[in-house]
Amino acid sequence: MTEKKEQELIYKLLSSPLERVKIFREIPENKQGFIILNLPKRIQKKIMDKLSDRELIEMIDYLDPTSATDLLQIINKKRANRVLKKLGQEIRKKIEFLLRFNPKTAAGLMSLDYIEIDKDISFGELYKIVKEYEKKRGKPPAILVVREGFLIGEIPFYRLALVNKEERARDYIKKVPSVKYDEDEKAVIETFKSHPHDKIVVLDDDGSILGIIYSDDVLKLLKKASVNDLQRFAGVSEEEDVLDPPLVKVKNRYRWLIINLATAFLAASVVSLFQKTISAYVLLAVYMPIVAGMGGNAGTQTLAVMVRGLALKEIEPKRVQKVIINEMVAGGINGIINGGLVALVATLWNKSPMLGLIVAIAMIVNLVIAGFFGALIPLIMKKLGKDPASSATIFITTATDVCGFFAFLGLANLFL
């Protein structure tokens, strides 16, 4: 099956909820598992709930233990155990071992595709072991070197083709990063970033090897984390897909929109305080959304930088004050640049230098405020144990709208 054909099938499964199971059953059994792994977990569960135990077993038989475990963790535990008992002994033991661990930890990400060798083994012997493993499993293993059961490094796979059969593994050992089995996904990502490598070894409490995490799995995890951050950033559920029906989308979004509505009324109440000023000088209404919009955009930019800094642990407590001041100064400079441009437009277009000056000052004030709240709110949410990406945009845009309108209309009330 070509990649194009697989993408077409995935699209059909996502966009045809009523025909989904029928379409899935028409896929060859040896391809079903690989197709379903590319679908969102919610869709995976809906399909598997409709399949019989026999169909699940036939699908899982073509998967490696790690992928099979991922799928069995989605269905209810009672059914998963029933299916597990009907699998072959070898794969069942591996899946039972992997199911012991939390899927959100290093152990939940690990694969069992590795071999352990002694440092004094010859490459001739090693080649035979690897060849036998590959013949049996259909894929080459990672080669981990141990001393008395404890990890000391790895032999890069390419070495098998470059060295003499008489040479010993000990002369070609390369260090490999490791993590404890109960470390969370963020710790795995940090280890991968700190030690760029094609794999990470997972260790038990006693230092023995439990499994291995390949770079492909870490990259998928990074992609998943980035997508989830973006979804939370926009107030969209990570369970929502682009092809979901309207009612599902409404269910995932309406709470955020109601909160936004409440904050919009707060900004509107500030505007209502200056009704007479706006009535006397209607042109103010043209520039109000510009001042508020620029503040919201600047605050969102700051928020994005802060969320990334917090995720990468770049913001230490002693740097907090400097970070906030830097963002406020940057906001002020951007306010001068953009405020100057708006003042020029107001002077040339509306023949009102005073209006241009008021807009420019209001924009400078609002972008400084955007820098302040854009930096402070994520820090406060992090301190409270909340996700800074999940709802900070609402509070930041509220702050910039309220302060921007107040500064702009307040100055207009004084000087126009």
Image (cartoon, helix red, strand yellow):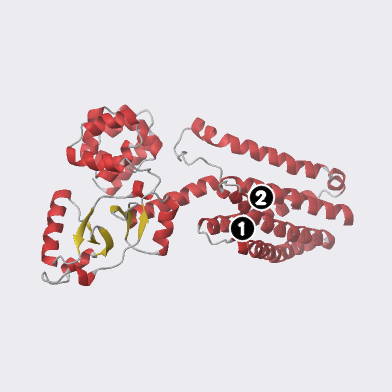
Q: How many marks?
A: 2
Q: CA distance from mark 2 to mark 1?
A: 10 Å
Please, what is the three-letter code of the amino acid marked with disc 1?
Thr
**Quadrant including the N terminus:** top left
User: In the rendered view, would you say 219 is above or below 57?
Assistant: below
- Using the rendered view, name the quadrant where residue 367 is placed: bottom right
User: In the rendered view, would you say 232 is above or below 198?
Assistant: above
- Using the rendered view, name the quadrant where residue 256 is placed: top right
Q: Secondary structure at mark 2?
A: helix
Please, what is the three-letter code of the amino acid marked with disc 2?
Ile
Q: Are marks 2 and 1 in contact (CB under 8 Å)?
A: yes
Which disc, if any, is residue 302? Answer: 1
User: Which residue is depicted at the point 24% across and 65% down?
Assistant: 156
Upstream in the sequence, badge 2 or badge 1? 1
What x and y, as percent, mark residue 103? 37, 43
What x and y, as percent, mark residue 268? 75, 42
Which disc, if any, is residue 396? Answer: 2
Q: Secondary structure at mark 1?
A: helix
One can see residue 317 in this view: yes
